[in-house]
Amino acid sequence: MKKIAISVGDLNGIGIQLALENHNKIKKIVEPIYCIDKEILNRVSKLLDIDIPKDFNCISKNILPLFDIKPSQVDRDSGLYSFNSFKMAVDLAKKKRVDGIVTLPIHKKAWELADIDYKGHTDALRDFFDMDAIMMLGVPQMFVALYTEHIPLRDVASKIKENRLKVFFINFYKSVKPKSTIAVLGLNPHAGDNGVLGDEEKIIQQAINSATKELIDNYKINLSFPIFSSPLVPDIAFTPNIRKKYQYFIAMYHDQGLAPLKALYFEEGINVSLNLPIVRTSVDHGTAFDIAYKGVTLNSLSYINAVKYHTI
Amino acid sequence: MKKIAISVGDLNGIGIQLALENHNKIKKIVEPIYCIDKEILNRVSKLLDIDIPKDFNCISKNILPLFDIKPSQVDRDSGLYSFNSFKMAVDLAKKKRVDGIVTLPIHKKAWELADIDYKGHTDALRDFFDMDAIMMLGVPQMFVALYTEHIPLRDVASKIKENRLKVFFINFYKSVKPKSTIAVLGLNPHAGDNGVLGDEEKIIQQAINSATKELIDNYKINLSFPIFSSPLVPDIAFTPNIRKKYQYFIAMYHDQGLAPLKALYFEEGINVSLNLPIVRTSVDHGTAFDIAYKGVTLNSLSYINAVKYHTI
């Protein structure tokens, strides 16, 4: 059974409730190691009125500094603790003491208050490893990787460059090694309609060809199916019949992939950081301060899926 | 009961089978007038082995020229006939002899072979009426109007102009007169995240404000709810909770609106031409030559929805 480090996120939010409530479920999937001090966990347990399961394995080393939980508040101390918990999980993975990490949600503003220079987990991972992490979101039956992420729409088309695409395609393939063809989306309406509505699809196709050649020649990949599809028509790429054919999609830009994904699977999605020495998954929701420490029953689909990904 | 003219589309395709098979259903919703000659309908009926319902009201005037049905073939004569059937339906609407029209699918290549200069129905309607038709697709619970349509993605951002948007918003409101707020989408990921990921949302917001002011001042619109939303974050605009709040969405570009729509409702969608003197609806699928005249049971959801729209 795989060992997975779980960083507990912002303790003023809902993450730790998810961890406590779902421990008995996830211990059947992986061997979890929670990056939290026993002492602060006791404080959380009292506030939530949820007992700590006996086999809830916390990392022994103090993460520190301890602080007072302030339910639903954006707080400097809680921000710092969540960052230290995350760093601990990453360290365990770096030292191969775990096989991967799951991160519970942090609060960006709390990180800012704690003078942490990163915008979020993915940003921090890029810096820790000095590598171009690939961001992928999805559910077990449909994952969407983003070729461009948080940039204005007007800048997307100029990023469609053959070499950069080729490197992305190769890195993505090597990160997931899927058992079926990877769906690559076109950029334009109707995938350009033979150049009438834009011609970036030609560049995308060239990058597909050269990535395929390189994977075969240099990496000795030998598959019974094409590694990549031709650029798909974006507005029908996520219809039921096409989804049956593909598990992994590469979107050219943020909303092209995420709007259909979230329309279909909002509550269940996870966030995966690929192309790093470690695999990190995360729930695809925030700290939900509005419902934290209020005795609300939480939807755990995203958390369970984030854990399950490590066993795919 | 409303009278609706139905143009029969490319007779080598599936449209006329849909019309014959669903006549008994749709005559309970509207009074259909089919733009087809009796003689050619007889030929179709024999080939399909479907009887012509007794009250299947065909327009008496010859549409002409008659031709031989060639199932599943792209054909000049069939292209010309489908165009003439469409023109007949438009004429009936222009003369107020019907309240609206439903068009069955034509084949663009067949129109090209018949020297018809239009790319499709919407293109022809813009020319017939010399007006800027608004293209809207959807299902009864969710319609998406497109601010920009068939243009390359790289050209979208430069079309975000306050005055053009304002005119579009006003025309759209006047065309549908919805009973709840119209959802307007932002352009950029996270709707620009306060300008960090693009600033077109400011222009969209200004256009929303000026369109609202003009509708109130000049058109005396007085509603108990805001006419338009603020620019929504595109990738969560189509999640279940947001969809509960809105029936009509305005997307800034083709795939922003249509990818989520088709992911959710591929088989049921219809195409509506708005901002014209007549209302035209259409199925949102093609001639399906691969299954035409083969005794296949057809999915009629889109056709039924196209008819129903006229009674909303």
Image (cartoon, coloured by chain):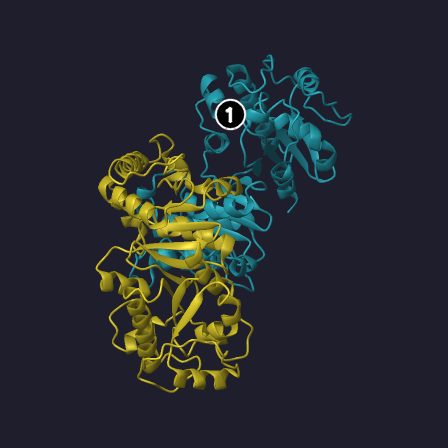
Chain colours: A yellow, B cyan
- Quadrant in which the N terminus of chain A appears: bottom left
Instruction: Name the amino acid, label 1.
Output: His
Badge 1 density bin: few <14, some 14–19, many ≥20, Cα 10 Å = many
- Quadrant in which the C terminus of chain A appears: bottom left
Report which residue position mark 1 lands on.
B107
Residue at 31% x, 74% y is: A83
Q: Point out residue B204 in the picture as x, y percentages from the top left corner.
A: 38, 55
Question: Left of A199 or right of it: where is B245?
Answer: right
Q: Is residue B207 above or below residue B194?
A: above
| Viewer can see residue B201 | no
| Occupied quadrant, residue A59 | bottom left
Q: Point out residue A16 in the picture as x, y percentages from the top left corner.
A: 45, 75
The residue sitting at the front extreme is A1
Q: Secondary structure at mark 1?
A: loop
Q: Point out residue A2 in the picture as x, y percentages from the top left corner.
A: 41, 62
Q: Point out residue B108 in the picture as x, y percentages from the top left corner.
A: 47, 25
Q: Nearer the viewer, residue A196 or A206?
A: A206
Q: Is residue A41 above or below residue A171?
A: below
Q: Nearer the viewer, residue B290 or A32?
A: A32
| Viewer can see residue B271 | yes
Q: How many marks?
A: 1
Question: Left of B59 or right of it: where is A203?
Answer: left
Residue at 27% x, 43% y is: A165
Q: Nearer the viewer, residue A189 or A301?
A: A301
Question: Left of A27 or right of it: where is A182?
Answer: left
Question: Left of A180 or right of it: where is A244?
Answer: right
Callout 1: residue from which chain?
B
Q: Is residue A53 above or below residue B67?
A: below
Q: Nearer the viewer, residue B185 or A235?
A: A235
